[in-house]
Image (cartoon, coloured by chain):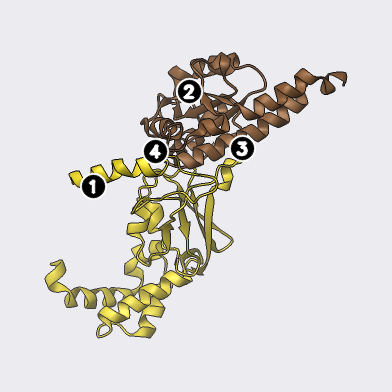
Chain colours: A yellow, B brown
Amino acid sequence: MKSSIVKEALKYFVNPVTEAFPAAKPYFPKKYRGPPVYDQDKCMGCTACAHVCPADAITVIVKDGKRALEVWYGKCTFCARCEESCPVDAIHLMEEFGIPSEDKLVFKSTVTHDMVKCRLCGKPFITIKHAEWVKKNLLEKMSDVIGSEEIDFFLTVCRDCRHEIENIPGFRKLLIRVLIKGEKVWV
Amino acid sequence: MGLKKCFLCSLAKWARKKSVWLYHAPAGGLCNGCDIEIAAAITPRYDVERFGILLAPSPRHADVILVAGQMTKHSKERLLRVYQQVPEPKAVVAIGSCAISGNIFTTDNYPVAGTVDQVIPVDVYVPGCPPKPEAIILGVVKAIEKLEKRTAESI
């Protein structure tokens, strides 16, 4: 520990302390947190990042059957909660600093996704990529309980319609089957 | 128009570009993170004095105001006074997420009087929480470009 301090001190007798900033690249320490940027290919639009954002820097807009996620790092705290909550590593805090601008609405990163419409009420409620991801995970963990076609059948019903579960007898049966399978966990 | 060619005016133009003095005005609600980064930006490590950038003790000596933090009701009048005291031409640099949008303090909080650009005109925004000293230097450099334009207009 002490020898490292002496080394650090002696270093400045040889080289100048001043960083040649505009000419040389700036130094970024380990685990530096810069502006968050979305990866359009990886992101599936599940809005987990928007839910955990403490500063509400991430907004979700549903328009014309498309869901747009937008992170405005002019409002960001750079806490990296979005990065750690993302299930598919689609948002990253880059190793760079935000370039100053005259317009404050420039500091943005956006992704848009196509959405699935509800089979019963016709409202768009989930992105296509997210539905595929849910299906893949369900098949991995519960392929003995639910079939692939059955998942397709039930994944196209929105949350509000699913609350009226009494009206869909098939749904009720499925729920009972799943509950029985995972009895040790839930009961 | 004749004034444009006078020697003193061109000297003033050149001097304004080569020696920009800053005034650091914290706008109330802030965590001091941005203040510390501003202090870091004027240390020998970044050495902004090689660009002629210097911290001024009074707004009357300054060309550029650095505003950091969320605008509170108490500091609103003070910031306005500071802005009025800076001689023309002047530029304002908003530093950090709080000055841009309010960050986690939001704009509908009870001691808050909106963002900085609702009180005084802001020329350059520097994002970051807090921004790196390099970003602050780049922001001031952008403000210098604006100052040059204004000097040309005023003469």
Circle 2 Cα neighbour tier, 10 Å, few/some/many (<14 / 14–19 / ≥20): some
Residue under label 2: B25
3 or 4: tag closer to the N-terminus: 4
Q: Which residue is mark 4?
A: B104
State which quarter of the image contains the C terminus of chain A: bottom left
On the image, the x and y values in percent for residue A49 come to 39, 56
Q: Marks 4 and 2: which is nearer the front? A: 2
Three-letter amino acid code at disc 3?
A: Lys
Element type at marker 1? helix
Amino acid at pointer 1: Ser
B25 vs A43: above or below: above
Q: Nearer the viewer, mark 1 or mark 3?
A: 1
Dot 3 corresponds to which residue? B142
Amino acid at pointer 2? Ala
Q: Earlier in the sequence, mark 3 or mark 2?
A: 2
Chain that bears disc 1: A
Q: Nearer the viewer, residue A88 or B137?
A: B137
Which is more N-terminal, label 2 or label 4?
2
Distance from the alpha carbon under mark 4 to that under mark 2: 20 Å
Answer yes or no: are tags 3 and 2 on the same subunit.
Answer: yes
